[in-house]
Structure formats: C-alpha cells, structure tokens
Amino acid sequence: AQSVAQPEDQVNVAEGNPLTVKCTYSVSGNPYLFWYVQYPNRGLQFLLKYITGDNLVKGSYGFEAEFNKSQTSFHLKKPSALVSDSALYFCAVRADDDYKLSFGAGTTVTVRA
Amino acid sequence: EADIYQTPRYLVIGTGKKITLECSQTMGHDKMYWYQQDPGMELHLIHYSYGVNSTEKGDLSSESTVSRIRTEHFPLTLESARPSHTSQYLCASSEVAGGLGDTQYFGPGTRLTVL
C-alpha cells in the first residue's frame, strides 16, 4: 500500500517570500514522487518528479523539491513566491513496481500581493 | 501543456441519461487513467488501462465503464447518470521514460452535473 500526506490544507505567504508546501509519503520499496499544480477549472500540470539520483529536484516555474529518505518527505519549495503561484498543489507517490499514483489531499496556496 | 483532450468540458444532464466522456491523447502513450475529483479535493483513480483491450478498475468504486479499442482513445461511459455522479472527471496518460518511471499528463477535465 502507498499513501501521501499533505499536512497543511492551506498555506498563505506574501509575494517575494519563500514558499514551502509539505509532503510525506509511505510506500513499499523505492518511491517515485511527483508534484502537480491545479488552477481553477483546469486539469493538473506536472511540476517535477524524483525518481533517483540527486535529492534536490528542480522543476517548472522556479519550483524545486527535496527528497529526504529518512524523513520520508518530499517538500516543494520556491525561494520567492509570486501571486500567480496561487493554486492547489498535489503531491503524489507510486512504488517502483506499479504505475498507479496515489495523491495527497492537496494544499491550497495563496500568495498575497 | 500535454496533448491530451477531454470533451465536453462542462456537461449538465438529467438523472437517468446515458453519457460518454471523451478522452484522447496524441502522444502515443500506452497507459491511460480516469480520476474522479470533487472540487478542490483529492483525486481518486476509478479506471486505468495499460494498453489496447486492457482495462482495470481503480481504487474508488465507480458505476462507470471504460473501453480501450485504440491507443489514443479512452472513453468513460455512465449508463444511467445520478446526482451522486456529479463531480469532475480527469483523464491522464503516461509512458515509461527510459525505464526510470513515467509522468502522468492530465487533460483539462470534464465537470459533470447531474440534476
């Protein structure tokens, strides 16, 4: 079984400040981890993924995420948030022997001007 | 944006109607998925396919059915819609990228309302 926890329903930050969206996971075997973003009335857009290698992964729109195996975490970060980053963010995990993804409940990010 | 399309984008229908939600992708991906998502909530996998003539039920029980006759096409059908089917339905596709794992790419979704 595999699962994802996003402990914060909402994250509020001021524009220009660092943004962090937390994610922890549980999976048997090696994890494949993903971050997606969803804007209102849209599908999910892929941001970045961790498969293997460097624990710091860089993705689209200036986002990055750090894989921490000991803490089973994969937090999403952006050094300087923009108002346009306001959206719903989903973390997802799958095991290395399964193509099905398990999604977290999502975190709503609001960046105020 | 990935080349995956869903129609219609919005649909309002009455109870008891038969509906088909269309999903097509032009990327040649062998794997396709249907998710159900209530607004602002998590996604639940309801169907998936690993190739032509292959379909499986997902983790969330659904009264819908799917078919995969062509690689690019993965329609979802509700034989008799009910208000409990009101939700957003997201289609996705993926392929294995160099054997290191695949990325699912999503369509824009169909927002279904059953009156």
Image: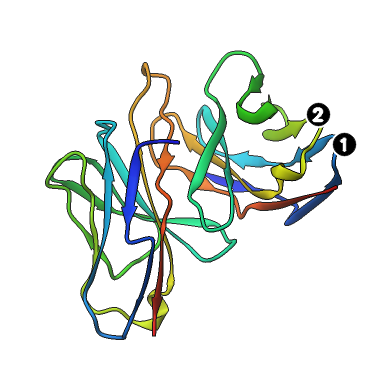
Q: Amino acid at mark 1?
A: Asn
- For disc 2, the neighbor class at 10 Å (few under 14, some 14 to 19, many from 20) is few
For mark 2, what is the residue?
Answer: A79
Using the image as rendered, state which of residue B30 and residue A101 is in the foreground: B30
* Image x and y of residue B83, in percent: 40, 82
* Protein chain holding label 1: A
Q: Mark 1: few, some, or many residues within 10 Å (few <14, many ≥20)? A: few
Task: Specify whether disc 2 shares its chain with disc 1.
Answer: yes
Residue A49's image quarter?
top right
How many angstroms separate mark 2 from mark 1 (CA)?
7 Å
The residue that appears at 48% across and 37% down in the rendered structure is A94
Task: Determine the residue positioned at 76% across, 44% down.
Answer: A83
Give the amino acid at mark 2: Pro
Q: Nearer the viewer, residue B9 or B46?
A: B9
The image's mark for residue B36 is none
Residue labelled with disc 1: A17
